[in-house]
Image (cartoon, rainbow, N blue to C red):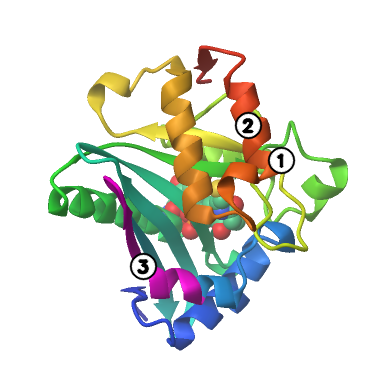
Amino acid sequence: MPIDYIEVLDPDSDLIADFHDNVLVEAFPDKYVREDIPILRKNVIIKNWTDGNEICRYHLFTACKDGRVIGGVSFYFFSFGSYAIGMGSYIGVRKEHRKGGIGRKLIDIRDQTLFADAREFDCYLKELVIQVNDPSLMKIEEIKNDSMDPWKREMFWRKRGYRKIAFNFIQPAIKPEYPPIEYLSLHIYPYVHELKDMKRISREELREIIYCFVKCTGTVGPMETDPSYLRMKSELAEQEYFAVI
Ligand SMILES: CC(C)(COP(=O)(O)OP(=O)(O)OC[C@H]1O[C@@H](n2cnc3c(N)ncnc32)[C@H](O)[C@@H]1OP(=O)(O)O)[C@@H](O)C(=O)NCCC(=O)NCCS
């Protein structure tokens, strides 16, 4: 039975709940890092927004087999006018279907979709940034409860050209009653040739990336007063460059 890769455009589609229940719950067992069904639906409803010269677009693709969602990827395209950045949200494949190339196909779809958006908005696609569980920041219990060995996950991305940014990233709480997440690190994948061997990233570039992430994934209150965002801003002020390792 072939696998169908479907972009979810209808917020009432059953694919959203299936993606959440079948894929996200297993792949992201820590409920505090996981968007719930109403948040996923809201993302699909909003889909596009603009603010000044910023253009943002949300995408959710599901991998379906025998009428069941077995994987998916969600991400944002974020343009500042002449250039754009891709921001990963979630990617997951059900355990029994892993190591068969579905993850790779979802990564290809993400790249192709971001390039298509960049063409549509007449800008160039600079880089993609994702949040990855960082085993060096995780407690033993968090490592034990993870859905895969976090060291292997880091290797998975590293082999594909993603590099960790040495910065203390904090994901602001995604619901008022949830805590912020402190064990994720940002990884960057440069699309432009000149950035392929980047060893460091400037404060201004990193500030922009963090701004995009927080604006896309949201904070429970106003961004300007969110404690996690404020903490990252003050850490940014301390260094001019941040290592990419
Ligand atoms: C990360 C994840 C999405 C990868 O999905 P996947 O479908 O297993 O990915 P792929 O099959 O494309 O690749 C996985 C491995 O299988 C190998 N593989 C792919 N096709 C294969 C095949 N036909 N036969 C044997 N091995 C194969 C790949 O080479 C890869 O190995 P590598 O990591 O050593 O390079 C999946 O492990 C997952 O859902 N993890 C939990 C959620 C998560 O951590 N998401 C990422 C958050 S940052």
Is 45 placed above or below 126 here? Answer: below
Q: Nearer the viewer, residue 235 or 197?
A: 235
Above or below for 69 versus 243: below
Give the mark nearest the N terminus, 3 or 2: 3
**Which residue is under mark 3?**
47
Could you tell me which secondary element the residue under label 3 belongs to? loop
Query: Label 1, on which residue?
Result: 183
Q: What stretch is highlighted in magenta?
A: 41-55
Write down the quadrant of residue 57 in the picture: bottom left
Q: Distance between the residues labelled 2 and 1?
A: 14 Å
Is label 2 in contact with label 1 (beta carbons under 8 Å)? Answer: no
88 lies left or right of 170: left
Badge 2 element: helix
- Is residue 68 a member of the stretch shown in magenta? no
Type of the residue with mark 3: Lys
Q: Give neighbour class at mark 2: few <14, some 14-19, many 20+ (Cα, 10 Å).
A: some
For this rendering, which residue is in front, 138 or 71? Answer: 138
| Residue drawn 51% across the image and 12% down it | 240
Position of 3 relative to 145 (above/below): below
> Badge 1: few (under 14), some or many (20 or more) residues near its Cα, within 10 Å?
some
Q: What element carries label 1?
A: loop
Q: Where is residue 172 in the image (x, y as percent from the top left)?
A: 65, 48
First in sequence, mark 1 or 3: give its number: 3
Q: Which residue is drawn at 19% across and 36% down?
A: 82
Badge 1 amino acid: Tyr
Q: In the rendered image, which residue does mark 2 sit on? A: 232
Who's the residue at 72% across and 62% down the image? 176
Q: Which of marks 2 and 1 is nearer the N terminus?
A: 1
**Res 30 visible:** no
Give the residue at x 42% y 77%: 64
Q: In which quarter of the image is the N terminus?
A: bottom left
Cα–Cα gap, marks 1 and 3: 28 Å
